[in-house]
Amino acid sequence: MSAPVPLLAQAAAVLRREIAVERAGREALVTTAPFVAAFVVLAGLAFGPAPQQLAVAAGGTTWLAVLVATVPLARTVAGTERAEDSWDLLRGLVAPGALFAGKLLATWGALLLTAALAGGLVAVLFDVPVLPQAIYGGVLGTLALAALTTGFGVLVATGSRRRGLMAALLLPAGLPALLAGTQLSTPGVAVLPWALLVTVYATAVLVAAWAVFPVLLEE
Amino acid sequence: MRTHPSRTADRLLVVAAAGTGLAAAVLALLVAPTDAVQGQPQRLMYVHVPAAWLAYLCFAVVLLASIAYLLRRDLRWDRVAQAAAELGVGMTALAIALGSVWGRPVWGVWWVWDPRLVTTAVLLLVYLGHLSVRGLGDDRAAGARRAAAVGIIGFVNVPIVHFSVVWWRTLHQPASVLSPDPAPMDPRMAAALGVAVLAFTLAGALVVRRRLRVLAALDADHHPFPAPPVAAEPLVVLPRSRP
């Protein structure tokens, strides 16, 4: 009789599987990269062309792109398993905590790449500097959004109807990340309150999503 | 004939809510002085603040009932969460609408992009989502689980809404009562506000109790007791007549 697989090993296996699926299909990349590029270019046209206006709108453009990108990403959280009819098998084999951790890390990676792409494009096209506090906000803000996306993504996987509801759930719930991330990306704004906000928010969302994730698997 | 205890409680709540509501109206409209700066529009605060208070209270009830449902898996807790969320959404919408009506003469605009206003509007959207996920499938228990999950995650935004005024004060005035450094207030204004908050709380409790009865009846309709088996018709075999 084989020994039970530790949770960390299960989570790592789920993450490896997510990376393999992404490398094979490029689903998250194809879903978000063209969207982010189009979003930033169109935002520059909408908010510009004056450099002062672009500088003011830069942080908001980056974070709005990241926040909106969570909606299509949520559909990829359990999308492959649903397409292959293997969702029930996966949740039967893997402990809920490990499944959450693996899916969360994969989604976080996708969102970090999205934020880096959006932030890089904004920095180049809007001619604004990348602040150290913006990187801190980017790391924690995307972690919070990844926790929300993972939780609500599973909710989408189990409820096939009303997928449009995902935008209504994700976008408002991600507001603190948008606010704090935008302010941390803006030069001359007090760092401490916003850094505190994004830290508290990420912690609270992570704990709440981890706590309710097993419940969402009971379908 | 004895009255059912819950009906008696309802009647007491009706009397208490009506009495405190009447007292609040008298205090707010006749006793409390007119605000020296804001004028008559300030009296809207005697409804705006209690509505916001009741909304916060309802969302706290949603959180507790959602946790209780996930722990006990008793649909009664889910009905509490649903009834509280419905009332909370209504009160949030009322608070936003009254704040907008007040803001026009006082601030000169219907709406400002103040963090508290925006986050309150977002809170409304979060709890509308909480109510909407119930309809994602036909399974009543699954809908309750999803709603409980959204109710818990959504509550993360509630303290952020409140403390946004303290952290990111811009145009919206800071909390007058629940703040570390409360603003000075005329005692008659404070009395009117306190009685109005009590009236809204009592009326809210009454609304939730009534709604719970309706939701329980709906659940009973959807999940009726199994019907007794229909008696089989006697099988009569008639001899076939041969031509």
Image (tube, rainbow, N blue to C red):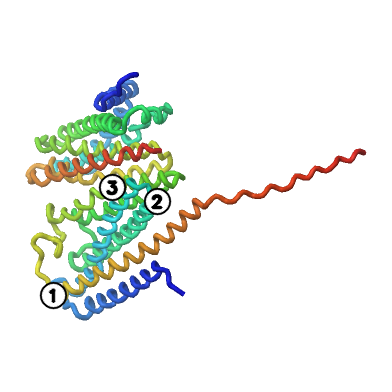
Q: Earlier in the sequence, mark 3 or mark 2?
A: 2
Q: Residue placed farthest to the bottom in the image?
A: B30
| Of the two numbered discs 1 and 3 in the rendering, the one whose residue sits closer to the viewer | 3
The crowd level at tag 2 (other Cα within 10 Å; few <14, some 14-19, many 20+) is some
Question: Which label sits on residue B43?
Answer: none
Out of A132 and A14, give the one closest to the viewer: A14
The residue sitting at 43% across, 72% down in the picture is: B3
Q: Amino acid at mark 2?
A: Leu
Q: Amino acid at mark 1?
A: Pro
Q: What residue does disc 2 label?
A: B75
Q: Amino acid at mark 3?
A: Ile
Q: Residue placed farthest to the top in the image?
A: A1
Q: Earlier in the sequence, mark 1 or mark 2?
A: 2
Residues flagged by tags 1 and 2 on a common chain: yes
C-alpha separation, residue under disc 1 versus residue under disc 2? 44 Å
Q: What residue does disc 3 label?
A: B152
The crowd level at tag 3 (other Cα within 10 Å; few <14, some 14-19, many 20+) is many
**Looking at the image, do the residues carrying marks 1 and 2 touch, with CB atoms under 8 Å apart?**
no
Q: Earlier in the sequence, mark 1 or mark 3?
A: 3
The residue sitting at 19% across, 44% down in the picture is: A201
Q: Quadrant of the N terminus of chain A?
A: top left
**Mark 3 residue element:** helix
Out of B179 and B108, give the one closest to the viewer: B179
Q: Identify the subunit bearing mark 3.
A: B
Horizontal and vertical percent position of residue A193: 10, 47
Q: Is residue B138 above or below residue B205?
A: above
Q: What residue does disc 1 label?
A: B187
Horizontal and vertical percent position of residue A108: 24, 32
C-alpha separation, residue under disc 1 versus residue under disc 3? 38 Å
Out of B155 and A153, give the one closest to the viewer: B155
Horizontal and vertical percent position of residue A195: 12, 42
